[in-house]
Protein backbone atom coordinates (compact mmCIF):
# COMPACT_ATOMS: atom_id res chain seq x y z
CA UNK A 1 0.00 0.00 0.00
CA UNK A 2 2.55 2.49 1.05
CA UNK A 3 5.42 1.80 -1.34
CA UNK A 4 3.35 2.20 -4.52
CA UNK A 5 1.51 5.25 -3.25
CA UNK A 6 2.62 8.62 -4.57
CA UNK A 7 1.06 12.05 -4.59
CA UNK A 8 0.03 13.72 -7.85
CA UNK A 9 2.58 16.49 -8.26
CA UNK A 10 0.81 18.15 -11.20
CA UNK A 11 -2.40 18.42 -9.18
CA UNK A 12 -0.50 19.94 -6.25
CA UNK A 13 1.30 22.39 -8.53
CA UNK A 14 -2.05 23.39 -10.05
CA UNK A 15 -3.49 24.17 -6.60
CA UNK A 16 -0.40 26.22 -5.70
CA UNK A 17 -0.88 28.23 -8.88
CA UNK A 18 -4.62 28.58 -8.30
CA UNK A 19 -4.21 29.82 -4.72
CA UNK A 20 -1.41 32.10 -5.91
CA UNK A 21 -3.90 33.91 -8.18
CA UNK A 22 -5.53 35.34 -5.05
CA UNK A 23 -3.61 38.44 -4.06
CA UNK A 24 -1.34 38.06 -7.10
CA UNK A 25 0.99 41.07 -7.49
CA UNK A 26 1.45 42.66 -10.94
CA UNK A 27 5.15 41.74 -11.14
CA UNK A 28 4.67 38.25 -9.66
CA UNK A 29 4.36 37.03 -6.11
CA UNK A 30 1.46 37.35 -3.72
CA UNK A 31 0.14 39.79 -1.14
CA UNK A 32 -2.43 38.12 1.11
CA UNK A 33 -2.01 39.82 4.49
CA UNK A 34 -3.79 38.14 7.39
CA UNK A 35 -7.54 38.89 7.62
CA UNK A 36 -7.52 40.99 4.47
CA UNK A 37 -10.01 40.63 1.61
CA UNK A 38 -7.40 38.55 -0.18
CA UNK A 39 -7.11 36.29 2.88
CA UNK A 40 -10.88 35.92 2.85
CA UNK A 41 -10.81 34.79 -0.76
CA UNK A 42 -7.93 32.42 -0.07
CA UNK A 43 -9.83 30.90 2.85
CA UNK A 44 -12.91 30.39 0.71
CA UNK A 45 -10.86 28.59 -1.93
CA UNK A 46 -9.21 26.28 0.61
CA UNK A 47 -12.54 25.57 2.33
CA UNK A 48 -14.08 24.71 -1.05
CA UNK A 49 -11.25 22.27 -1.76
CA UNK A 50 -11.66 20.73 1.70
CA UNK A 51 -15.38 20.17 1.05
CA UNK A 52 -14.74 18.77 -2.45
CA UNK A 53 -12.40 16.24 -0.86
CA UNK A 54 -15.13 15.14 1.55
CA UNK A 55 -13.41 16.54 4.65
CA UNK A 56 -15.41 17.53 7.73
CA UNK A 57 -14.73 21.26 7.84
CA UNK A 58 -14.55 23.32 11.03
CA UNK A 59 -13.42 26.87 11.81
CA UNK A 60 -12.48 27.93 15.33
CA UNK A 61 -12.93 31.27 17.12
CA UNK A 62 -9.51 32.37 15.88
CA UNK A 63 -10.41 31.62 12.29
CA UNK A 64 -8.15 28.57 12.10
CA UNK A 65 -9.45 26.21 9.37
CA UNK A 66 -9.55 22.43 9.83
CA UNK A 67 -10.47 19.66 7.38
CA UNK A 68 -10.89 16.32 9.11
CA UNK A 69 -10.70 12.99 7.24
CA UNK A 70 -12.27 10.35 9.53
CA UNK A 71 -10.22 7.23 10.31
CA UNK A 72 -11.27 3.70 11.22
CA UNK A 73 -11.03 4.72 14.87
CA UNK A 74 -12.40 7.85 16.51
CA UNK A 75 -9.10 8.81 18.17
CA UNK A 76 -7.03 12.06 18.14
CA UNK A 77 -6.02 12.85 14.56
CA UNK A 78 -2.65 13.10 12.92
CA UNK A 79 -2.48 16.72 11.79
CA UNK A 80 -0.61 18.49 9.02
CA UNK A 81 -0.91 22.00 7.64
CA UNK A 82 0.56 25.48 7.79
CA UNK A 83 -0.78 28.93 6.80
CA UNK A 84 -2.10 30.77 3.72
CA UNK A 85 -1.54 34.35 4.85
CA UNK A 86 1.55 35.99 3.32
CA UNK A 87 3.79 39.01 3.81
CA UNK A 88 3.35 41.96 1.45
CA UNK A 89 5.91 40.58 -0.96
CA UNK A 90 5.11 36.90 -0.54
CA UNK A 91 5.64 33.93 -2.80
CA UNK A 92 3.61 30.91 -3.89
CA UNK A 93 5.12 28.47 -1.42
CA UNK A 94 5.60 29.95 2.08
CA UNK A 95 2.83 28.32 4.12
CA UNK A 96 0.67 27.52 1.10
CA UNK A 97 2.74 24.42 0.29
CA UNK A 98 2.09 22.92 3.71
CA UNK A 99 -1.68 23.36 3.49
CA UNK A 100 -2.03 22.27 -0.13
CA UNK A 101 0.31 19.28 0.23
CA UNK A 102 -1.94 18.16 3.09
CA UNK A 103 -4.94 18.34 0.76
CA UNK A 104 -2.96 16.47 -1.90
CA UNK A 105 -2.26 13.66 0.59
CA UNK A 106 -5.99 13.47 1.30
CA UNK A 107 -6.87 13.31 -2.40
CA UNK A 108 -4.21 10.63 -2.96
CA UNK A 109 -5.74 8.52 -0.17
CA UNK A 110 -9.24 9.14 -1.53
CA UNK A 111 -8.15 8.00 -5.00
CA UNK A 112 -6.58 4.86 -3.53
CA UNK A 113 -9.63 4.13 -1.37
CA UNK A 114 -7.47 4.05 1.75
CA UNK A 115 -8.89 4.77 5.21
CA UNK A 116 -6.21 5.23 7.84
CA UNK A 117 -6.65 3.96 11.38
CA UNK A 118 -6.28 7.45 12.87
CA UNK A 119 -8.17 10.41 11.40
CA UNK A 120 -6.12 12.86 9.36
CA UNK A 121 -6.60 16.61 9.75
CA UNK A 122 -5.38 19.39 7.45
CA UNK A 123 -5.08 22.80 9.13
CA UNK A 124 -4.62 26.35 7.89
CA UNK A 125 -3.74 28.58 10.83
CA UNK A 126 -4.67 32.25 11.02
CA UNK A 127 -2.03 34.98 10.86
CA UNK A 128 1.15 32.94 10.90
CA UNK A 129 3.21 35.78 9.41
CA UNK A 130 2.59 38.39 12.10
CA UNK A 131 3.40 41.02 9.46
CA UNK A 132 0.09 42.85 9.98
CA UNK A 133 -0.78 41.67 13.52
CA UNK A 134 2.05 40.67 15.85
CA UNK A 135 3.03 38.20 17.16
CA UNK A 136 3.60 35.78 14.34
CA UNK A 137 2.08 32.30 14.61
CA UNK A 138 -0.86 33.98 16.40
CA UNK A 139 -3.54 31.53 15.22
CA UNK A 140 -1.65 28.38 16.20
CA UNK A 141 -0.50 30.00 19.46
CA UNK A 142 -4.13 30.61 20.46
CA UNK A 143 -5.10 27.14 19.19
CA UNK A 144 -2.64 25.43 21.57
CA UNK A 145 -3.63 27.67 24.50
CA UNK A 146 -0.47 29.79 24.45
CA UNK A 147 -2.33 33.10 24.08
CA UNK A 148 -5.80 33.89 25.45
CA UNK A 149 -8.32 34.27 22.64
CA UNK A 150 -9.54 37.63 23.96
CA UNK A 151 -5.98 38.99 23.98
CA UNK A 152 -5.52 37.95 20.36
CA UNK A 153 -8.87 39.44 19.31
CA UNK A 154 -7.97 42.74 21.00
CA UNK A 155 -4.60 42.98 19.23
CA UNK A 156 -4.21 46.01 16.95
CA UNK A 157 -2.24 45.72 13.73
CA UNK A 158 0.14 48.07 11.96
CA UNK A 159 -2.94 49.76 10.43
CA UNK A 160 -4.67 50.17 13.81
CA UNK A 161 -7.33 47.57 13.03
CA UNK A 162 -8.29 44.98 15.70
CA UNK A 163 -7.92 41.27 14.98
CA UNK A 164 -11.44 40.56 16.28
CA UNK A 165 -13.04 43.19 14.05
CA UNK A 166 -11.14 41.96 11.00
CA UNK A 167 -12.08 38.34 11.68
CA UNK A 168 -15.74 39.39 11.83
CA UNK A 169 -15.42 41.60 8.75
CA UNK A 170 -14.26 38.71 6.59
CA UNK A 171 -16.67 36.24 8.21
CA UNK A 172 -13.78 34.12 9.47
CA UNK A 173 -14.67 33.84 13.12
CA UNK A 174 -15.85 30.29 13.63
CA UNK A 175 -17.45 28.60 16.62
CA UNK A 176 -15.14 25.66 17.17
CA UNK A 177 -13.32 25.90 20.52
CA UNK A 178 -9.69 26.97 20.91
CA UNK A 179 -7.11 26.23 23.55
CA UNK A 180 -7.50 22.54 24.26
CA UNK A 181 -6.51 20.69 21.10
CA UNK A 182 -6.44 16.92 20.92
CA UNK A 183 -3.81 16.04 18.30
CA UNK A 184 -1.84 12.82 18.11
CA UNK A 185 1.09 14.31 16.15
CA UNK A 186 1.78 17.23 13.81
CA UNK A 187 3.99 17.36 10.71
CA UNK A 188 4.44 20.51 8.60
CA UNK A 189 5.89 20.63 5.09
CA UNK A 190 7.49 24.03 4.38
CA UNK A 191 10.01 25.59 2.03
CA UNK A 192 13.30 26.23 3.84
CA UNK A 193 13.34 29.94 3.01
CA UNK A 194 17.12 29.90 3.34
CA UNK A 195 20.17 28.72 1.35
CA UNK A 196 21.27 25.63 3.29
CA UNK A 197 19.62 22.78 1.36
CA UNK A 198 20.43 24.27 -2.03
CA UNK A 199 24.07 24.97 -1.07
CA UNK A 200 24.37 21.44 0.35
CA UNK A 201 22.76 19.85 -2.73
CA UNK A 202 20.23 18.12 -0.46
CA UNK A 203 16.52 17.62 -1.23
CA UNK A 204 14.91 17.14 2.18
CA UNK A 205 15.49 18.90 5.50
CA UNK A 206 14.56 17.00 8.67
CA UNK A 207 14.01 19.99 10.94
CA UNK A 208 15.30 19.51 14.49
CA UNK A 209 14.26 22.85 15.98
CA UNK A 210 13.10 26.41 15.40
CA UNK A 211 15.36 29.24 16.54
CA UNK A 212 14.34 31.83 19.15
CA UNK A 213 12.56 34.98 17.96
CA UNK A 214 12.54 38.46 19.53
CA UNK A 215 10.53 41.31 17.95
CA UNK A 216 10.60 44.79 19.55
CA UNK A 217 8.94 48.00 18.38
CA UNK A 218 10.71 51.24 19.37
CA UNK A 219 9.15 54.72 19.31
CA UNK A 220 11.58 57.64 19.58
CA UNK A 221 10.36 61.18 20.24
CA UNK A 222 12.69 64.12 19.68
CA UNK A 223 12.18 67.75 18.66
CA UNK A 224 11.43 68.82 15.12
CA UNK A 225 13.57 71.76 14.15
CA UNK A 226 15.01 73.64 11.22
CA UNK A 227 17.62 71.59 9.36
CA UNK A 228 19.64 74.70 8.60
CA UNK A 229 19.47 76.92 11.61
CA UNK A 230 19.66 74.37 14.44
CA UNK A 231 23.24 73.79 15.65
CA UNK A 232 24.11 70.09 16.00
CA UNK A 233 24.58 70.54 19.79
CA UNK A 234 20.93 71.57 20.16
CA UNK A 235 19.36 68.79 18.16
CA UNK A 236 17.10 65.99 19.47
CA UNK A 237 16.99 64.04 16.26
CA UNK A 238 14.69 60.98 16.44
CA UNK A 239 15.52 60.03 12.86
CA UNK A 240 19.25 59.94 13.51
CA UNK A 241 18.68 57.94 16.72
CA UNK A 242 16.62 55.33 14.86
CA UNK A 243 19.23 54.93 12.15
CA UNK A 244 22.03 54.82 14.70
CA UNK A 245 20.16 51.98 16.39
CA UNK A 246 19.80 50.12 13.10
CA UNK A 247 23.56 50.46 12.58
CA UNK A 248 24.15 49.23 16.12
CA UNK A 249 21.98 46.15 15.48
CA UNK A 250 24.17 45.19 12.53
CA UNK A 251 27.37 45.71 14.57
CA UNK A 252 25.88 43.75 17.50
CA UNK A 253 24.85 40.67 15.51
CA UNK A 254 28.16 40.68 13.61
CA UNK A 255 30.04 40.71 16.91
CA UNK A 256 27.91 37.92 18.44
CA UNK A 257 28.28 35.89 15.25
CA UNK A 258 27.21 32.25 14.89
CA UNK A 259 23.47 31.92 14.22
CA UNK A 260 22.71 35.46 15.47
CA UNK A 261 20.71 37.55 13.01
CA UNK A 262 19.14 40.98 13.33
CA UNK A 263 16.87 43.04 11.10
CA UNK A 264 15.34 46.51 11.15
CA UNK A 265 12.60 45.77 8.66
CA UNK A 266 10.13 48.57 9.23
CA UNK A 267 10.99 52.23 9.83
CA UNK A 268 8.92 55.40 9.69
CA UNK A 269 10.14 58.88 10.58
CA UNK A 270 8.19 62.12 10.77
CA UNK A 271 7.64 64.66 9.51
CA UNK A 272 9.84 62.96 6.88
CA UNK A 273 10.85 66.18 5.12
CA UNK A 274 14.19 67.18 3.67
CA UNK A 275 14.60 70.32 5.77
CA UNK A 276 13.12 69.25 9.12
CA UNK A 277 14.95 67.46 11.94
CA UNK A 278 12.74 64.43 12.66
CA UNK A 279 10.85 64.47 15.95
CA UNK A 280 9.36 61.00 15.56
CA UNK A 281 10.66 57.59 14.59
CA UNK A 282 9.00 54.19 14.90
CA UNK A 283 10.85 51.04 13.89
CA UNK A 284 11.10 47.34 14.64
CA UNK A 285 14.04 45.12 15.54
CA UNK A 286 13.87 41.38 14.76
CA UNK A 287 16.58 39.40 16.60
CA UNK A 288 16.92 35.61 16.31
CA UNK A 289 19.31 32.91 17.47
CA UNK A 290 19.20 29.15 17.91
CA UNK A 291 20.75 29.74 21.36
CA UNK A 292 18.41 31.46 23.84
CA UNK A 293 21.22 32.66 26.06
CA UNK A 294 22.90 34.48 23.13
CA UNK A 295 19.54 35.89 22.07
CA UNK A 296 19.05 37.30 25.59
CA UNK A 297 22.53 38.81 25.43
CA UNK A 298 21.62 40.55 22.17
CA UNK A 299 18.38 41.86 23.66
CA UNK A 300 20.18 43.22 26.74
CA UNK A 301 22.91 44.94 24.72
CA UNK A 302 20.32 46.53 22.44
CA UNK A 303 18.37 47.83 25.45
CA UNK A 304 21.56 49.29 26.97
CA UNK A 305 22.47 51.00 23.69
CA UNK A 306 19.03 52.60 23.32
CA UNK A 307 19.09 53.79 26.93
CA UNK A 308 22.45 55.52 26.45
CA UNK A 309 21.39 56.96 23.10
CA UNK A 310 18.25 58.48 24.64
CA UNK A 311 20.36 60.40 27.15
CA UNK A 312 22.94 61.43 24.54
CA UNK A 313 20.32 62.68 22.05
CA UNK A 314 17.81 63.99 24.58
CA UNK A 315 14.95 61.92 23.13
CA UNK A 316 12.12 59.96 24.76
CA UNK A 317 12.03 56.21 24.14
CA UNK A 318 9.08 53.84 24.28
CA UNK A 319 9.36 50.17 23.40
CA UNK A 320 7.05 47.18 23.33
CA UNK A 321 7.65 43.52 22.69
CA UNK A 322 5.79 42.31 19.59
CA UNK A 323 6.91 38.69 19.82
CA UNK A 324 9.22 36.62 22.01
CA UNK A 325 9.53 32.85 21.54
CA UNK A 326 12.35 30.67 22.90
CA UNK A 327 13.98 28.15 20.57
CA UNK A 328 11.77 25.07 20.17
CA UNK A 329 13.28 21.58 19.79
CA UNK A 330 11.19 19.02 17.87
CA UNK A 331 10.45 15.49 19.07
CA UNK A 332 13.51 13.33 18.29
CA UNK A 333 11.46 10.32 17.17
CA UNK A 334 9.47 12.52 14.80
CA UNK A 335 12.66 13.94 13.29
CA UNK A 336 13.88 10.36 12.86
CA UNK A 337 10.64 9.53 11.01
CA UNK A 338 11.15 12.39 8.56
CA UNK A 339 14.75 11.37 7.96
CA UNK A 340 13.86 7.66 7.56
CA UNK A 341 10.96 8.37 5.19
CA UNK A 342 13.13 10.61 3.02
CA UNK A 343 15.84 7.97 2.82
CA UNK A 344 13.30 5.19 2.10
CA UNK A 345 12.14 7.24 -0.89
CA UNK A 346 15.71 7.62 -2.05
CA UNK A 347 16.05 11.34 -1.29
CA UNK A 348 19.09 13.02 0.17
CA UNK A 349 18.26 14.39 3.61
CA UNK A 350 19.97 16.43 6.31
CA UNK A 351 19.06 17.54 9.81
CA UNK A 352 18.86 21.27 10.35
CA UNK A 353 17.32 24.08 12.42
CA UNK A 354 14.68 26.45 11.09
CA UNK A 355 15.61 30.11 10.78
CA UNK A 356 11.97 31.07 10.29
CA UNK A 357 9.12 30.76 12.74
CA UNK A 358 6.41 28.21 11.98
CA UNK A 359 3.08 26.97 13.29
CA UNK A 360 4.85 23.69 14.07
CA UNK A 361 6.72 25.41 16.90
CA UNK A 362 3.36 26.04 18.58
CA UNK A 363 1.94 22.55 17.95
CA UNK A 364 5.14 21.19 19.55
CA UNK A 365 3.71 22.44 22.86
CA UNK A 366 0.87 19.89 22.70
CA UNK A 367 2.03 16.91 20.63
CA UNK A 368 5.07 15.25 18.99
CA UNK A 369 5.94 17.51 16.07
CA UNK A 370 8.42 17.84 13.25
CA UNK A 371 8.87 19.59 9.92
CA UNK A 372 9.92 18.65 6.42
CA UNK A 373 11.88 21.27 4.46
CA UNK A 374 12.41 21.46 0.72
CA UNK A 375 14.93 23.79 -0.97
CA UNK A 376 14.29 27.44 -1.77
CA UNK A 377 15.98 28.46 -5.01
CA UNK A 378 18.61 31.09 -4.24
CA UNK A 379 17.64 30.70 -0.60
CA UNK A 380 15.13 33.51 -0.94
CA UNK A 381 11.70 33.97 0.60
CA UNK A 382 9.46 36.83 1.71
CA UNK A 383 10.27 37.92 -1.82
CA UNK A 384 8.09 37.75 -4.94
CA UNK A 385 10.69 35.56 -6.62
CA UNK A 386 10.41 32.80 -4.00
CA UNK A 387 10.62 29.51 -5.91
CA UNK A 388 10.92 25.78 -5.24
CA UNK A 389 11.46 23.36 -8.12
CA UNK A 390 8.59 21.05 -9.06
CA UNK A 391 10.61 17.90 -8.32
CA UNK A 392 11.39 19.20 -4.83
CA UNK A 393 7.74 20.07 -4.19
CA UNK A 394 6.85 16.53 -5.28
CA UNK A 395 9.60 14.99 -3.13
CA UNK A 396 8.51 16.92 -0.05
CA UNK A 397 4.86 16.01 -0.50
CA UNK A 398 5.73 12.33 -0.96
CA UNK A 399 7.78 12.35 2.23
CA UNK A 400 4.81 14.01 3.96
CA UNK A 401 2.51 11.27 2.60
CA UNK A 402 4.72 8.53 4.02
CA UNK A 403 5.20 10.19 7.40
CA UNK A 404 1.46 10.79 7.76
CA UNK A 405 0.69 7.18 6.76
CA UNK A 406 3.31 6.01 9.26
CA UNK A 407 1.77 8.06 12.05
CA UNK A 408 -1.85 7.26 11.26
CA UNK A 409 -1.51 3.44 11.15
O1 LIG B 1 8.83 35.62 10.76
C1 LIG B 1 8.82 34.42 10.52
O2 LIG B 1 9.77 33.72 10.78
C2 LIG B 1 7.61 33.77 9.89
O3 LIG B 1 7.63 34.04 8.52
N1 LIG B 1 6.41 34.23 10.50
MN1 LIG C 1 5.68 30.24 6.68
MN1 LIG D 1 6.71 33.64 6.19
Image (tube, grey):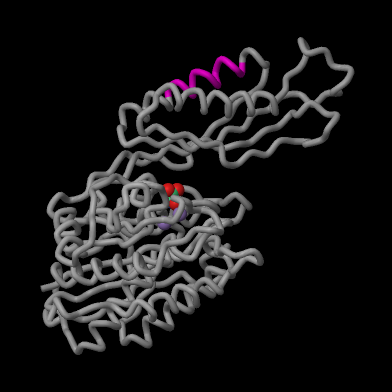
* Residue lying farthest to the top in this orientation: 233
Dominant SS type (magenta): helix
Asked whether 305 falls inside the magenta stretch, the response is: yes
Part of the protein shown in magenta: 300-310
Q: Is residue 265 visible?
A: yes
Residue at x 47%, y 34% (from the top left corner): 262
Residue 151 in view in this figure: no
In the current view of this chain or complex, which residue is farthest to the front? 201
Could you say which quadrant of the image residue 311 lies in?
top right
Locate the N terminus and report the quarter of the image it occupies.
bottom left
Relative placement, left or right, of 380 versus 118 is: right
Q: Position of residue 29 (x, y in %)?
A: 56, 63
Place of residue 383 in the rendered image (x, y in percent of width and height, measured from the top left): 54, 54
**Residue 69 coordinates in the image, percent (x, y):** 25, 80
308 relative to 70 in the view: left or right: right
Relative depth, front residue between 123 and 341: 341
- From the viewer's perspective, tell me whether residue 135 is left or right of residue 281: left
The residue at 33%/63% (across/down) is 178
Amino acid sequence: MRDALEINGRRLAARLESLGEIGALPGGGVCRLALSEEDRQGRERVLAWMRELGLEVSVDAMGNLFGLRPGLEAVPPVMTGSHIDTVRTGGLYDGNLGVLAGLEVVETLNDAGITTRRPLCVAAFTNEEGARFAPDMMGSLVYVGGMPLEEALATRGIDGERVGDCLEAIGARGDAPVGAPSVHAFVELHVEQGPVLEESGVTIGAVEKVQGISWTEFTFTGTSNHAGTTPMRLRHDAGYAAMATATFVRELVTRIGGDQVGTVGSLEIAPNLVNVVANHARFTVDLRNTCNQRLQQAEEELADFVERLAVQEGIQVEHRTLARFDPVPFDAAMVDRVEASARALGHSVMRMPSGAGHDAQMLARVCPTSMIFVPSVGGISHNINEFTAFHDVEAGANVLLQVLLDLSE
